[in-house]
Amino acid sequence: MKVFRRAAVLSIGLLAVCLLAAGCTKSGTSPRAEEKAPIPKAGQCIGQEIKDFDDLAPDFNDVVDCTKSHVYEVVDVIAVPKQFLTGNTKADRAANRKQLATVKDESALKTKFEQFASASCGQATLKAAGLSKLRIAGKAASEAGVDPVMGGALNWLNLTPTANWIDGDAKLVCSIRYTKHIITTNDVGPQPVKAKTELPAYADYLTKDFPLVRRQCVTYDGKGQRALTPCDEEHYGEMFFSFDARRAFGDAFVKSVDLTDPHDANWAKISRVCTDALPLLLGEDIDSQLTAVAEPGPGGWDGQSDYYGTNCLVAPKHAEEFDLPGGTLIGNAEQVDFVPFTPSQKI
């Protein structure tokens, strides 16, 4: 029999990792930083070859059809508000723009700008992936820290190329950068993706056209512990989104949760977030033997953390008896061919 413990399982959501001028690399400024480039549009894909994680700059000259191999998908392009570009003279305004584009700058202005950039791109990603309609404990998805769970993807924030930026074309480019899948490797270096339609892959997140290799599922390993697994193999749950229970329910609430008690009332409220989201994820007409549950995710559930990551996944109601077949439930949830769970194979 499967024994369900509320031990944390790391989900691979989208992490804001990069905010700098598009021409910068970790070691300095690339030659293309000195040249102006066309600014991409939301929904475009960038197909450049990238050697390693430290190549931080999307090449805006390399826009390709999204069905072709690409690393970046542009989610949104946002004009930087004037409050960050103030100055009495043209020289003052140019100096402010330069300050915002300086990687090591730790000024109050830069900190406030980074907060704006992270929040703006996060909201754009939620909308593009179809998750912005979620409500978590009465809060908007962005307020509750909702993140789509994509295996091998990072939320990538860049400014327009240095020459554009200094010349006054100050925009924030929000992208998704695809990486190697952490299930099979600890390397988060870039790895191209191909969309199945003319739209970028992220636009198909809630459809069967989203690449299966980028979905994330959970199984039991040989020691009876929950572990990530590719979704094309048998699994007991498919992850769809994560959220921060602390931001959704408050500090006192999450600290009162007893993860060792399978009947904890406050955990039941957290798990209800996932069941309430089922119609958005899979539609109204789904197999009656499916349910949605919450599991502790990344972050700390020890009463000491600022982040209480929570994963929402869909699983069989009788998970002690059945697994889900390989594949995604999206587009296949009306009648599921459940797989009998064989303890000797996994525990």
Image (tube, rainbow, N blue to C red):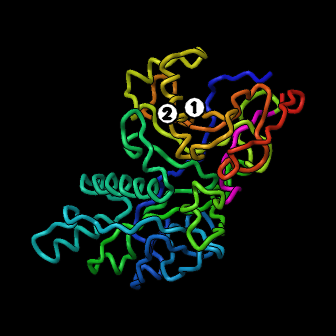
- In the picture provided, is 49 more to the left or to the right than 21? right
Find the residue positioned furthest to the front: 285
Residue 225 against residue 84 in the figure, above or below: above
Q: Tell me residue 249's x, y (percent).
A: 40, 29
- In the picture provided, is 117 more to the left or to the right than 207? left
Camera-near label (1 vs 2) is: 2
Mark 2 residue type:
Val
Task: Residue at 52%, 40% (x, y): give it.
Answer: 277
Q: Quadrant of the N terminus?
A: top right
Task: Residue at 53%, 16% (x, y): give it.
Answer: 264
Q: Which residues are magenta?
A: 211-221
- Alpha carbon separation for disc pair 1 and 2: 8 Å
Task: Identify the residue under disc 2.
Answer: 273
- Sequence-wise first label, 1 or 2: 2
Q: Quadrant of the C terminus?
A: top right
Task: Identify the residue under disc 1.
Answer: 294
Q: Tell me residue 339's x, y (percent).
A: 83, 37
Considering the numbered disc 2 on the image, is that residue within a helix, a strand or a loop? helix
Q: Are marks 1 and 2 in contact (CB under 8 Å)?
A: yes
Identify which residue, 143 or 89, lies in the foreground. 143
Considering the numbered disc 1 on the image, is that residue within a helix, a strand or a loop? strand
Residue 31 against residue 254 in the figure, above or below: below
Q: Tell me residue 168's x, y (percent).
A: 26, 77
Count how many numbered circles sit on residues in the image.
2
Q: Quadrant of residue 22?
A: bottom left
Q: Residues within 10 Å of mark 2 (few under 14, many from 20)?
A: many
Residue 276 against residue 105 in the figure, above or below: above
